[in-house]
Amino acid sequence: MVEAEVPKLASAAEYFFRMGAEGKRFRPTVLLLMATALNVPMPRRPTDAVVDSVSGELRTRQQCIAEITEMIHVASLLHDDVLDDADTRRGIRSLNFAMGNKLAVLAGDFLLSRACVALASLKNTEVVSLLATVVEHLVTGETMQMTTTSDQRYSMEYYMQKTFYKTASLISNSCKAIALLAGQTAEVSMLAFEYGKNLGLAFQLIDDVLDFTGTSTSLGKGSLSDIRHGIVTAPILFAMEEFPELRSVVNRGFDDSANVELALEYLGKSSGIQRTRELAAKHANLASAAIESFPDSDDEDVQKSRRALVELTERVITRSK
């Protein structure tokens, strides 16, 4: 889906889809499991071939959502790395570092355009609207991060809203799109949305923790990257509630490594890491509850996929990278 006429652009667009650089494929995995978890087995008809054809077409359309989601995600990574002047991503050189900012931006734009073409082919206006909203949210979240006032920067509510836009909107709206394509009710579609939203928030909160506790090798990026970019995340926000004097350290900025060390000292004395893990667990439990609220099904494949989605909520909060 990312073929391009110009070889250089094709090489750039495929950069993070190659073996060894493709990442966890977390989002496509969730969406394909969601597809099976929500697909109500069709009643058998005299012509089984017709049933199989309809079922196969639905699966193809849902798989297309998974592919679109991954393209949007990778495009956002390419653009973020340019904005952050990052030199690594997924344990290798970032595209902007390897091929330059201009080509990295164009590759991201190209992936978004291919995602739009694939989205249009589904011919479902509600699904198109959902995924278009995701792109809007990605831009909004990044802008929120760049233009915060002092009060907003230290607001947990503002931080969680920004986190939803930057991370959770993509997976939540994609899960809802999967449900809509399966012909599910508005109630079930919203449960799918809630699963994706809370899973995405839990995922990012653990990322916040790992930025302080992980190593650059396991994370595929430099540890302490957020704080070195002046980005205040949940652990620091919680620590600031216990030690208000930490705010003045953050206000001074982190160009001086001494301020970084001082902030880490306050964080170490606080329960910021623990409280962030607890908040992540809360959202993981909400995601699990959404799956358990799905309509009952005796289908073995449906049940297996639902168990896998619940298991994912546990893995998200216990992962180390």
Image (spheres, helix red, strand yellow):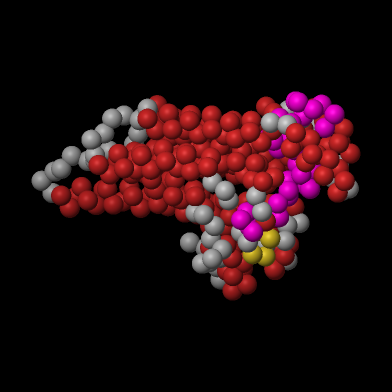
Q: Is residue 99 above or below residue 55?
A: below
Q: Where is residue 64 in the image (x, y as percent from the top left)?
A: 42, 52
Q: Give the range drawn in magenta.
A: 217-246
**Is 289 contained in the magenta span?**
no
What residue is at 86 percent from the left and 49 percent from the top? 257
x and y percentages locating residue 193 in the rendered image: 47, 34
| Whole-percent x, y for residue 143 in the image | 73, 41
At x 62%, y 67%, the residue is 12
| Farthest front residue in view | 269
User: Would you say 313 lies left or right of 147 here?
Assistant: left
Q: In this view, does 293 lie to the left or right of 12?
A: left
Kindly tell me whether residue 215 is visible in this rendering: yes
Any part of residue 174 in sight: no
Left or right placement of residue 106 versus residue 241 in this view: left
Q: Which sits in the foreground, 61 or 188?
A: 188
Residue appearing at x 53%, y 29% in the figure = 282
